[in-house]
Image: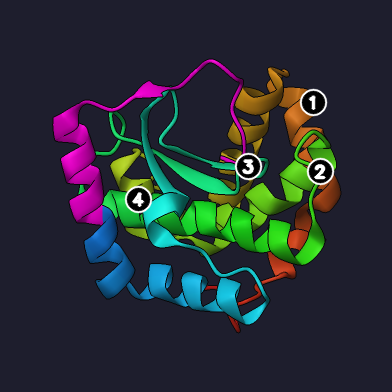
């Protein structure tokens, strides 16, 4: 998720902060998607200081990219495993990448819809195992259905809009943004 309403975040507990630091350090060193995204942010001129870039908070979502502060918030009270944290980090790193290359206006639902489509498509959010864990068992076009659903849910949460309106924004950008796999050569 690229943004969340102000005031929705509170500090992590000491225990949550310790787990956050441990997971982030491990994932930055070992997770191929996280490493790939950090390397590509650097390649396009937006290197990050990992210790300052990934912030631990308690919040109503699993993660968020804050373009104004240039940081990724990982919501400690919503992360249930290190692998889950890696998927969230990759999702939010795609927003950071999109913002670096295009200077997105996250208040514009079209901009947000595109980066949410890309993040859902490329981050692992819609990997088959994640969809199975959510109870979504369809096989035909399940990845595409998931990408649209996840992007729409993000728009609904950020803009507090009905599903029909969010779906309209996602549909407007879907074909173009789904095909844009940068910095990946193809959908992982």
Looking at this view, is 9 or 183 the one in front? 9
Residue 109, percent across and down? 80, 36
- Please tell me which residue is depicted at 46% across the width and 77% down the height of the picture: 36
Q: Secondary structure at mark 4?
A: helix
Q: Position of residue 153 (x, y in %)?
A: 59, 32
**Mark 4: few, some, or many residues within 10 Å (few <14, many ≥20)?**
some
Q: Estimate the x, y position of residue 81 in percent, counting from the top left.
A: 20, 46
User: Which residue extends farthest left?
Assistant: 15
Label 3 vs 4, first from the N-terminus: 4
Give the label, 2 or 3, closer to the camera: 2
**Precedes in sequence: disc 3 or disc 1:** 3
Crowding at mark 1 (Cα within 10 Å: few <14, some 14-19, many 20+):
some
Residue holding disc 3: 151
Which label number is shown at residue 82? none
| Dot 3 and dot 4 residues touching (CB under 8 Å) | no
Mark 2 and mark 3: Cα distance apart in space: 16 Å
Q: Which residue is mark 2?
A: 105
Decide whether residue 90 is among the magenta residues: no
Relative to 11, 119 lies left or right: right
Question: What SS does tag 2 mark?
Answer: loop
> How far is mark 2 from mark 4, CA to CA?
29 Å
Instruction: Answer with the quarter of the image where residue 164 lies.
Output: top right
Q: Which residues are magenta?
A: 1-23
Q: Which label was assigned to residue 130?
A: 4
Counting residues from the N terminus, which is met first, the one under dot 2 or under dot 4? 2
- Residue drawn at (73%, 43%) of the image: 112
- Residue 138 appears in view: no
Q: Are marks 2 and 4 in contact (CB under 8 Å)?
A: no
- Asked if residue 7 is positioned above or below residue 152 in the image, the reply reads above
The Cα atoms of the two marked residues, 3 and 1, are separated by 12 Å
């Amino acid at each position: 998720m690229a943004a969340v309403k102000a005031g929705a975040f509170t500090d992590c507990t000491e225990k949550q902060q310790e787990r956050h630091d441990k997971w982030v350090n491990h994932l930055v060193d070992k997770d191929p998607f996280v490493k790939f995204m950090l390397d590509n942010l650097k390649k396009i001129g937006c290197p990050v200081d990992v210790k300052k870039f990934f912030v631990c908070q308690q919040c109503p979502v699993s993660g968020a990219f804050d373009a104004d502060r240039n940081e990724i918030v990982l919501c400690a009270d919503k992360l249930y495993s290190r692998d889950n944290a890696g998927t969230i980090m990759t999702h939010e790193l795609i927003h950071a990448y999109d913002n670096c290359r295009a200077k997105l206006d996250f208040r514009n639902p079209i901009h947000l819809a595109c980066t949410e489509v890309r993040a859902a498509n490329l981050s692992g959010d819609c990997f088959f195992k994640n969809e199975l864990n959510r109870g979504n068992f369809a096989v035909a076009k399940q990845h595409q259905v998931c990408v649209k659903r996840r992007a729409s849910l993000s728009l609904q949460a950020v803009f507090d809009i009905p599903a029909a309106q969010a779906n309209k924004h996602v549909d407007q950008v879907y074909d173009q943004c789904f095909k844009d796999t940068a910095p990946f050569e193809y959908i992982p």
